[in-house]
Each structure stands twice: as C-alpha cells, then as structure tokens.
Image (cartoon, rainbow, N blue to C red):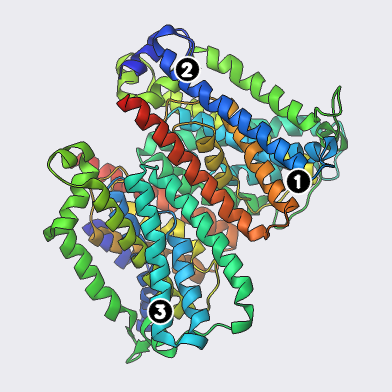
Amino acid sequence: MLLIAVLWIVEPGLRNPIWASGVIRFAVPLAILAACQTLTMLTGGIDLSVAAVASMAAYIMATQTPAQGPVVAVALGLAATALAGLVNGIGVGVFRVHPLIMTLGMSLIVLGLMTVYQLQMVTSGSIIPESVAWLGGGTSFGFFTNSLLVFVPLAALIVFSLRRVGFGRLLYAVGDNEIAARLSGVRVWQVLVTLYVISGLLAGLAGIIYGAVTRTASVTLVERFLLPSVAAAVIGGTSIFGGRGGYSGTIVGALILTVLTSLLTVLQMPEPVRQILFGAIILVVAAAYTRITDES
Amino acid sequence: MTAAAGTVQGSAPGRTGGTVARVVRRNAWTFGLAALLLVLFLVTRAIKPTYGAAELRSLAIGALPIAFAAVGQAIVVISGGIDLSIGSLLALTNVTAAALMAGGSEESAVPVVLFVLFLGLFLGAVNGLLVVASRVPDIIVTLALSFVWAGAALLVLKSPGGGTAQWLKGLIDGTIGSEWIPEALVLLVVSVALVWLPLRRSRLGLSMYAVGSDRLAAFRSGVAVAPTKVAAYAVTGLFAAMGGLSLSMSTGIGTPVPGPYTLLSVAAIVLGGVSLVGGRGGLLGPILAVFVLALIRADLTFLNVDPNFTTVVQGVIMVVVVMVGAFATLRRRTA
C-alpha cells in the first residue's frame, strides 16, 4: 500500500492546488462507486448495475428539480436507487441468482426504463440544483473540494463499519465462507439484501455528485465509470472472490486511476493510445498487487 | 468433486454412465430452449402472418456475430474463465479484415480471412497467457484487455470504413436447398462443428471441462491447467475472429467501436445453460439462446413496443431465466 502511495506522489509532474482539486473532484464519485464494488466483492459478489443506477439518480434529480424542488428531487433519485438495490438484493440473496447476472440484468432494466422516462421528460428540462452543484462540484478557498465534506465522513463510516461494526464483519464472514456463516446463525439473505440496498444508495450518491461535477444529466452519464470502479477496488487489494480487502485501499485505487486518466489527458495522447495504456496499466498494477499480497 | 473426477477419467463429458443426471439436466435445458424457440416462432407467425423465409434469413444474418461471440464465451466459461474483451476482439478483427480487404481483389481476400482467423487465435492466446501469468482474476484481466483491444481497433481504423470482398458477403446472403435454410445459419453450424466437435472429443476438450469443474482436482489428476486455459482463450479468440468476419460480411465495412457483444454473449450463455462457475454446459444451448433473444427483439418491434423497452425486457428475461434455473437446481438438490 505504501508503495502505491509513493508511486502516486512521484508520478504526476505537475502538482498545483487547482489540478489537485480537479483530480479529487473526479476521484470522489469514482471512489464512492468503487465502495459499492468493494462491499459487494467482500461477499464474493459484484455490482455491475452501479453505473446505470448512478446515472438514474442524477437524471431523476435533474428532471424533478424544476417541478418538485431540490430536496424532494434528491430524495426521489435516492429512493429509486434504493429500490433498484432492493431488487438486486432479493435476486442475489433470496433467489440465489449469480450477482454478475443479476446486476447486469438490472443495469439493462434501469437503462431501458430511464430511456423511456427520458422521452416523457423531454419537456420538463433538467436543472442541477445550486446547492447540490456547490456541494458536489464546487471548491472553497480556491482549492478545497466541497464534495470532500460528504466523502470524508462517508469514507470514515465505511472503513469504521467494516472493521468494528457487526454488519461489516458479517460481510467478511459471508464472503469468506457462506456456509460457515450460515451455520453460525447469520441470516445470509438479510445481509445480502441490506448490502445491495446500501450499494444502490451509494451508487445514487455518486451519480448525484458526478452530475454536479459535470453539471449535466443524462441516462448514460456515469457509464464510463463502471469498469474503473471495479478496477479501483481490485487495485486497492479487494479480492473478487470475497472475504479479503478493505475500503482504504479502494480509495487509493480510485485516486491512482483518476490521476492516471488526467495524466494521459494532460500528455495529449490520442484516444486509442490512451485506451491501450489505461488497460495495460490497470493490468500491470493489479498483477503487481497480486504478486505482493501472494508473497507476504 | 466426484463429478469432476468422473469427467476427467471418463471417455467424453456427458456421455459416461456416471454423469447421467447431468446429461438429463443439460439436455432438458436445451430441449426447453428449443421448445421456447419454436413457441416464439409460432407467436411471431401469429403476430405477423407474413413472417417467412426472408425474415428468417435476415434474422440469421443479424444474429450471426452474436452467435459466434456466444459460442466463444461459452467455451471460455466452460473452462472456468470469462472473457469480457470479446466485444473488443470482434471490433479489432472486424476492422483488421476491413482495412486489409479495402480495394483488394476478390482472390486476395482469402489470405486475409486466414490471417484474421489466426489473429483471433493469437489475441485470444495473449488473453489466456496474461490471465495465467498475472494470476489476476480472469474477469479483471479481460476487462483491462478490453480497453487495449478497443484502442488497437481505433488505431487500425479511425472511423467506420474499409471494404469486404463480394464473395464473403455472398457467403451469408442466400439460402441453401430449401428457402427456409439461411446460408448464415449453415455457416454458423459448419464453422462451430468444424472447431468444436473434434475439440470436445479430444484430450484438450476434456481438460477444459475438468479445469472448469474443479481446477485443483484437475491439476491433481494430471491435467496441465495453464496450457488448457490458454488454449480455451485462444479458441474463444478464434470464434471472436469469426464473429468479426461475419460483421464484415453483413455490413461490408469495419467498425472500430465495439458493439454490445460482450454483454449479449454473457446473457446468451447464461440463458443457454452454461454455468458461470464453469465445467457445465454445451454450445447448442447458447446458440439457441441467441436466436431466442433475437426473435424476442424482432417480436417486440412487430408489436410496436417502444424500442427502449426492449432493453428492459432483455434484462428481465435474463434475470428470470436464471432464477428459474436456480430454482430447478435447488429443488433437485433437496429432492
């Protein structure tokens, strides 16, 4: 982990407050999305619906703001994500559908529904509420990224819960050995349903913040963050097979990926080369990390 | 565990006496899908009485790349992996073929086709080698590589373009024998049979099922796990190249941006009864599933359903089918 932190400090050639706050602004929603992946991966699952769900939250918020006001709009957006998460959780926890399929299917369902909804909402226009835009995308004193006000407590909560709170330990227990967890009295399906609802809510939050950063809302807004969110969790040392990992590593992973993206943009690489390098670097970092953890 | 051992020692998966229960289960799923396809076809006839041979032909042409992708995906999943880069591989082989054939003569297309097939095999092997060498989970490696191959496709062709030899386009255009047998379908069956039937009968095919079923048990029974995985990925790459070529045949050009083939291929294999955990399933199920999905899409269009709902329906079908499958398995286990 130290190695990765050092790598990150050495890598960027230009380090000034504006650039740094820009990086953090984009890293925050990615880190929250990666939290969904971290939590679900701890139980041996994965949540591929986060991008669609996050876009849904941002889009519902933006289109409902003109009619309902910002508070209700945000609440509606988050309620929709909780519902999507609930369906995911029931599918995975109760009906034992493979999480990959369940969440992939859910992302299709959400995307389709939102496209239909979009056609009906064309007339209403979409507004990102000022308060949300300030909190999600604004900066104070020229360098402080406001979204950290949301993210720091949230990250602390997640890290703390995973270590010290019963529910956090249950995620590890279920991921490490589901049968053992069940035999020791854990109601696995309840854990999974709660987990996927939380994952949906987190995705919604990430979507709203990302909407505020870009000041736009569309049904495919967050789509390009799906793969990086999985990658961030893996680079951060969370095992995709469950039971191992944590959130602090994921945050570092999200930072690395965001720095990387911005670096590739700054260097003005052509798009194809950028894609190739991005994929190659994710692979190399993941491989290096696997080696390090295997040997220790 | 015993099933895995039986697969390794038996003559061919699905044909030995010890795995009767599995044969029944697998074939029941496939039969069910075939019945579903038939019902869907009748429904389609009911919705649109003019639905006939011509529509069937375009259905087969449209489904061809998806079917190849699904076949490739099925093979790698059976051997315990997953290839999320298959959509990018399709795009890369498609643009390579289109760029090399642009302006060339009809005869010069033959080496191009062979080269592209070899390229697919090679890129697939690279996928497999990196999975084995990096020890990173398959899903992450192929996810990362999907960026690499998509980027490479953009390097080959910046925007849709290139060309395709006429005889290649003609290969899937018509029908053979009866007007009800589209050439695209024949091409699919022939190429899959040519690669898969000998493979499944061979030691390598057995090893694939064994590795997918239980890696450790396979290793301890003397299966060379790493080469088997690389080979499985290579074959998947080969089918991805066929998918890319079939894209060339149906569109006549190369498109550097990957289509939704990764997603569709995963959906099709799950619907087709291939277990995502590995070691179970065949190729007939996924192919049937591709046509089921394609027919449903066509039906929804005929019914004037908002095309965006098609996505919803596809997602619902995917989830529901897996739920039903899980229930059937659960019941059998308790019974």
Q: Do dots 1 and 2 share one subunit? A: yes
Q: Position of residue A85 (x, y in %)?
A: 38, 59
Assess disc 2: are there few (<14), some (14-19) or many (≥20) residues with their C-alpha within 10 Å of its C-alpha.
some
**Callout 2: residue from which chain?**
B
The quadrant of the picture occupied by the N terminus of chain A is bottom left
Using the image as rendered, state which of residue B134 and residue A251 is in the foreground.
Answer: A251
Position of residue B48 in the picture relative to residue B14 (left or right): right
Q: Position of residue A125 (x, y in %)?
A: 59, 83
Residue at x 36% of width, y 47% of height: A92
Relative height, residue B46 to residue B37 (above, below): below
Q: Residue furthest front?
A: B46
Amino acid type at image mark 1? Ile
Q: Secondary structure at mark 1?
A: helix
Residue A44, horizontal then vertical, whole percent: 30, 45
Quarter of the image where the C terminus of chain A is located: top left
Chain where mark 3 sits: A
Q: How far is the residue under mark 2 from the one under mark 3?
A: 52 Å
Q: Which mark is residue B47?
A: 1
Q: For mark 3, what is the residue?
A: A74
Q: Which residue is mark 2?
A: B23
Mark 2 and mark 3 residues within 8 Å of each other at the beta carbon: no
Identify the element where label 3 is drawn: helix
What is the quadrant of residue B243 in the picture? top right
* Amino acid identity at mark 3: Val
Q: Is residue B145 visible?
A: yes
Left or right? Give the position of B233 relative to B53: left
- Camera-near label (1 vs 2) is 1
Residue toward you, A21 or A64: A64
